[in-house]
Image (spheres, grey):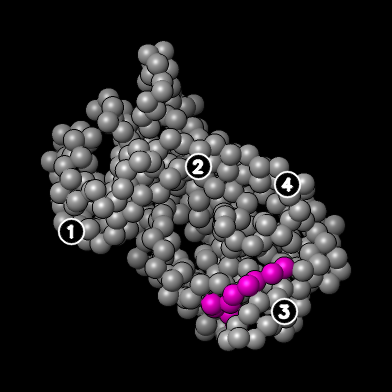
Amino acid sequence: MKTRVAIIGAGPSGLLLGQLLHKAGIDNVIVERQSGEYVLSRIRAGVLEQGTVDLMREAGVSERMDAEGLVHDGIELVFGGRRDRIDLKALTGGSTVLVYGQTEVTRDLMAAREARGATTVYEASNVQLHDVKGDAPYVTFEKNGETVRLDCDYIAGCDGFHGVSRKTIPAEVLTHYERVYPFGWLGLLSDTPPVNHELIYAHHERGFVLCSQRSMVRSRYYLQVPLTEKVEDWSDDRFWEELKTRLPKDVADKVVTGPSLEKSIAPLRSYVVEPMQYGKLFLVGDAAHIVPPTGAKGLNLAASDVSTLYRILTRVYRDGRVDLLDKYSPIALRRVWKAERFSWFMTNLLHEFTERDAFDRRMQRTDYDYYTTSDAGLKTIAENYVGLPYEPIE
């Protein structure tokens, strides 16, 4: 097999990159170790930044998103029972976010790729990347008992934190930055109407809580829990009771409970690897960085990587601008670190840390008071939440 760009991983970042490249006339093949059904079964976040929404539209896969997605002009923060609304649209000059599940994004991109007849190899085992620092990189994998070789010009590693792409880069080349948080999020998905028309991020002395949604009839709630907790110890009744305990009474009274469709516990961590490029291999999304979900940045940060790489490769093939290839990592990392900072900030602002002393707790409260009563503070939260602008490729 031969293609211009080999994409490792058929998650939303790999599929979005493939769709954009195909629209630009750049042939690509996606190699994925899991089945398509498994990829679609992964439950992930669903808050899309303005930039991600615009990129989906540019890729020509926005019809269902525009019809079914819920535009949110603001979010609510809660601390000490006090509710504060952040008017995203007013504070950013018109930018908003769109609630549309990552599973639905993936489904739309899969359908668009299939309609184009583009090649995606699912259930590919023993995927290996070769000669990524040389002139003729290639990928090998096993499928149906046979070893397949895929020759290409460039490789995009969109295969997540545990994928093969980052592991292909020599250890001495990479610098890792990491912060592991001493808690996780227990999430529950239910076919119940959301408690509020906008998302609520709430601090409580028993732990953080997030009231999110997937549609007007499907809700997603999260509770901060110690990493020692197990999902099987949390019945639906226990979850709903704890959720109501942590919310202001006027919100708790509106919670509609119901059987869970899915429950899981996700640990929280911040992680960045530098550089995001090695020769003709480019790391995209979770292969290069992880953010706590508090700032709704995971998928959106992957989308900004996709935008940067897509625009560089377009210039390479259209204009011969191979000099732009070395700009991928610096450009991507500038936005990555700003998103990491915001996610770290929101996590520290709204979660309960058992090791904090009285001084730390007062500083946390004072931080909250400043950011929610200062015009500058409100604008800082708003412009980061809707997404900082993409850096132009020049």
Q: Quadrant location of the N terminus?
A: bottom right
- Residue behind mark 4: 174
Does 343 appear above or below 187? Answer: above
Image coords of residue 107 (percent x, y): 44, 72
Along the polypeptide, which appears first: circle 2 or circle 4? Answer: 4
Residue at point 65% right, 71% down? 127
Label of residue 269 in the image: 2
Does 209 appear above or below 13? Answer: above
Residue at point 63% right, 72% down? 126
Q: Principal SS element in the magenta part? A: strand
Secondary structure under the numbered disc 4 in the rendered image: loop
Secondary structure under the numbered disc 2 in the rendered image: strand
The CA span between labels 2 and 4 is 19 Å
Along the polypeptide, which appears first: circle 1 or circle 4? Answer: 4
Given the image, on which type of amino acid does mark 1 rest?
Pro
Secondary structure under the numbered disc 1 in the rendered image: loop
Stretch of the chain drawn in magenta: 118-129
Marks 3 and 1: in contact by CB < 8 Å? no
Along the polypeptide, which appears first: circle 3 or circle 2? Answer: 3
Label of residue 150 in the image: 3
